[in-house]
Amino acid sequence: MDASFESSAPKSRLQKAVERNRAKQARRGSTSPAPPKKSWSLPKRPTRKSVARAGDVEFEDTSRPALRSRARATGNVSYQTASSPPARKRYSAAATNAASKSIDFLIKGIWIFAFILILRLIFSGGGVLDYYHQQKAYQEKLGDFTSIGIENQELVIENEKIRHNKRFQKKLVRDHLGFIASDEFLILFPKGKGKKSI
């Protein structure tokens, strides 16, 4: 059977694998002789002649019967690759329910934590409410500062009048100290007495 296997012109993959296996065994020192290697090559195609004249034209046969007669070995072909994803594990319904419940609990916990952080941001010291309260107090203090600055400017102007304006000096002495000129009379009315009815 081996002789018929080797004598057939087309070799299948199985035959090539058998030959490789025998060659390996021969290299290892096995007693079975390795079959002689045959060199396989395609039949030589005739070279194309150059066309010199119209009458010297030759046509080649392009059917290539030697290649078409070669039959491929049939075999079971597996289309799975080494990088195909592993088969999915099937989980029981109880395990999926427990996993979904734990995920739901985790999400609720995150929302509660975020809500607590927002409340702390709004109501704690240095939070949003404290910021607006401090901003209101700052605006009040800024208003007080500007009004005191205006009063200071008026006092500076009045001070300059007291130093240099004689008429203003006399007015202040009359109003605050009660001095009168030598040709004037002072009339004082008693305090607290109302009009008498007739």
Image: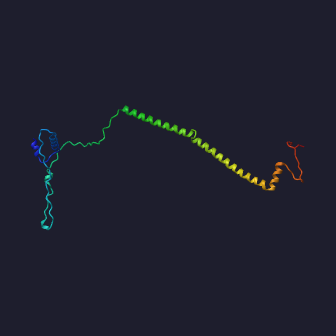
Asked if residue 9 lies left or right of residue 197, the reply is: left
Residue in the picture at 69% in, 50% down? 149
Q: Where does the image place residue 44, in percent across and percent down from the top left?
A: 13, 55
Residue in the picture at 43% in, 35% down? 104
Instruction: Give the quarter of the image for residue 86.
Output: top left
Compare residues 159 and 188 and report the one nearer the observer: 159
Residue in the picture at 71% in, 50% down? 152
Compare residues 185 and 167 and report the one nearer the observer: 167
Asked if residue 102 lies left or right of residue 79, the reply is: right
Q: Where does the image place residue 63, in percent across and percent down from the top left?
A: 15, 55
The colour scheme is rainbow
Vertical arrangement, residue 68 with respect to residue 101, above or below = below
Residue reaching furthest top? 94
Residue reaching furthest front? 29
Vertical arrangement, residue 56 with respect to residue 88, above or below = below
Asked if residue 193 lies left or right of residue 101, the reply is: right
Q: Where does the image place residue 96, in percent across and percent down from the top left?
A: 38, 34
Q: Where does the image place residue 162, in percent across and percent down from the top left?
A: 78, 53
Look at the image and tell me in which quarter the N terminus lies.
top left
Vertical arrangement, residue 115 with respect to residue 165, above or below = above
Look at the image and tell me in which quarter the C terminus lies.
top right
Compare residues 45 and 33 and report the one nearer the observer: 33
